[in-house]
Image (cartoon, helix red, strand yellow):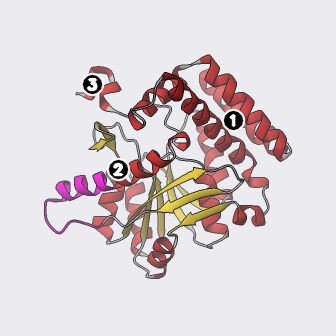
Amino acid sequence: MKERVSEGLYGLGWSTVKRLPGPVAVALGRRVADTTWKRQGKGVRQLEANLARVVPEAGPEELRALSRAGMRSYLRYWMDSFRLQTWPESRVRAGVSIEEIDRLTDGVASGRGVILALPHMANWDLAGAWLTTELNIPFTTVAERLKPESLYDRFVSYRESLGMEVLPHTGGSAFGTLARRLRAGGLVALVADRDLSSSGIEVDFFGETARMPAGPAMLAQQTGALLLPATLWFDDSQVMKGRVHSPVDVPAEGTRAERTAVMTQRVADAFAAGITRHPEDWHMLQRLWLSDLPGGGTA
């Protein structure tokens, strides 16, 4: 039943919201965000707990205001995503501005292959559409398998319509395919700020231990591709902003596991820098830090 409800809600979004005029969609998103925020459900409470780590000096009132802004940002992501397929290319091109983008374009032009690692900030789907539309850079990404399967298929179809190649997260073949794309000089974009599985790499994140994916660092070591963290944020305009951070180089010494740990920590540090500047645009409504998990994250 829960899966059918989820599928129905997403289907309603893609079928109905995308036909709404822009101002109406914006107003609807804000109303849904504020209503959800006032109800203080599990996701909102977790968002506030996460933001308390990011802004430890915030008092209760400031934290509540920040979580409200966070929910509005989160719903802006969904409202824009539901409507993104209807946007003309001119709007996609004008809707994104990325600082230090030459780090990415120069890397792709070199033929070395580039791994772009992003946290759950602002609208990564819009950033992807901008890459394929404005910069004419195709890329490959990975999507978590959702239930029901029809919902996963809908997400894959949506992202493929924006010019992305989408691989399933499960099944074991994604890593090999990503490595082949990188060796061919391609771009791989991965959302990489949360991995609670046993294969996740422990990092210090805002003073506490969290786990993040090993994939970006391992792909960089195996293929020689350039690893670039990037962060995104909204401002008061209709333009989404972003920044490509400095490359994360492969350490000269250490075992593969040690190099992976060092590189993943550097990615986490870049994410933390971007999230600190724009905490309201970090859409982490789930548990991330090990201390929040049952048993404190221990096996």
User: What residue do we see at 57% from left, 18% from top?
Assistant: 40
Which sits earlier in the primary sequence, circle 3 or circle 1?
1
- In the image, residue 4 lies at what x, y percent? 65, 26
User: Which corner quadrant of the image does residue 149 belong to?
Assistant: top right
Q: Gap in Å between the C-alphas at discs 3 and 1? A: 33 Å
Q: The N terminus appears in which quarter of the rendering?
A: top right
Front-most of 164 and 77?
Answer: 77
Label 1 neighbourhood size at 10 Å, few (<14), some (14-19), many (20+)? some
Residue of label 1 = 10
Tell me how many marks there are. Answer: 3
Counting from the top left corner in percent of width and height, residue 286 is at 46, 31
Left or right: residue 8 compared with residue 204: right
User: What residue is shown at x 49% (from left), y 30% (from top)?
Assistant: 47
Q: Secondary structure at mark 2?
A: helix
For this rendering, which residue is in front, 130 or 59? 59
Residue placed most toward the observer, 292 or 215? 292
Badge 2: how crowded within 10 Å, few (<14), some, or many (20+)?
A: many
Q: Which residues are magenta?
A: 249-266
Q: Quadrant of the C terminus?
A: top left
Residue 216 versus residue 29 in the image, above or below: below
**Disc ID at residue 268:** 2
Along the line of sight, the residue nearer the viewer: 167 or 206: 206
Q: Is residue 208 magenta?
A: no
Q: Are marks 2 and 1 in contact (CB under 8 Å)?
A: no
Frontmost of labels 3 and 1 is: 3
What kind of residue is marked 3?
Gly
Q: In the rendered view, tell whether residue 28 sits above or below residue 171.
A: above
Secondary structure, mark 1, is helix
N-terminal of the pair, mark 2 or mark 3, is: 2
Residue that label 3 marks: 296
Q: Amino acid at mark 1?
A: Tyr
Is residue 255 part of the magenta span, yes or no? yes
